Amino acid sequence: MTEINIGTVDVYVVRQTSTGLQILVMRRAQGVRCTGAWEVVHGRIEPDERPEQAARREVVEETGLVVERLYNVCCLPFYLGKLGVVNMAVVFAAFVAAEGDVRLGEEHDASAWLPATQAADRIAWPRARDMIRDILQLVGSGDAGPLEDVLRIFG
């Protein structure tokens, strides 16, 4: 029997600018999985963490940025063939300050703040493009409107 594990978070780091929302994308460095692929913040949920805690921690570790507001977007399954496990990633949109320098960890060698459509074009994973569209629909105005009380985790 194949195990199902809720084990990771995908975090779309978003900032509001005078020209609209921008999403942070990062390129995977040499010597790590998926070298050269552009992605968003991704990481494991530690045994003592809730998914939203893991999201905040991973954003700080991978970008040096502090999450001001966090929104729940969805959950995405992905089969990890080497482990024989269906992993469920909890997906978040994390708003950060419009100003602030990105400090990449060792997993990434480049980053870019891009308008949503350009971020979707650059990102490697097709489901990530769908998530960007969902984020625009859910929080594209800067908040979740009538869904705020359900989707906003904190901030």
Image (cartoon, rainbow, N blue to C red):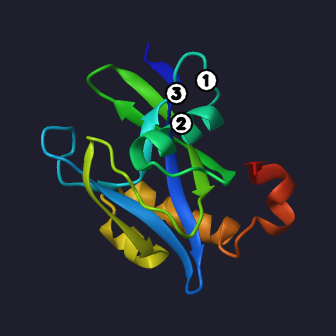
Secondary structure beneath label 1: loop
Q: Earlier in the sequence, mark 2 or mark 3?
A: 3
Mark 2 in CB contact with mark 1 (< 8 angstroms): yes
Which mark, residue 45?
Answer: 3
Mark 1 in CB contact with mark 3 (< 8 angstroms): yes
Location of mark 1 (residue): 49
Depth check, mark 2 against mark 1: the one in front is: 2
Position of residue 11 relative to residue 77, above or below, is below
Quick one: label 2, few (<14), some, or many (20+) residues within 10 Å? some
Q: Which residue lies furthest to the top in this view?
A: 1
Secondary structure beneath label 2: helix
Image coordinates for residue 96, horizontal then vertical, percent: 59, 59
The residue at 27%/42% (across/down) is 107
Q: How many labels does the image show?
A: 3
Depth check, mark 2 against mark 3: the one in front is: 2
Image coordinates for residue 114, horizontal then vertical, percent: 41, 74
Quick one: label 3, few (<14), some, or many (20+) residues within 10 Å? many
Location of mark 2 (residue): 57
The residue at 59%/85% (across/down) is 18
Measured Cα–Cα span from mark 2 to mark 1: 10 Å
Measured Cα–Cα span from mark 1 to mark 3: 6 Å
Image coordinates for residue 90, horizontal then vertical, percent: 57, 40
Which mark, residue 72?
Answer: none
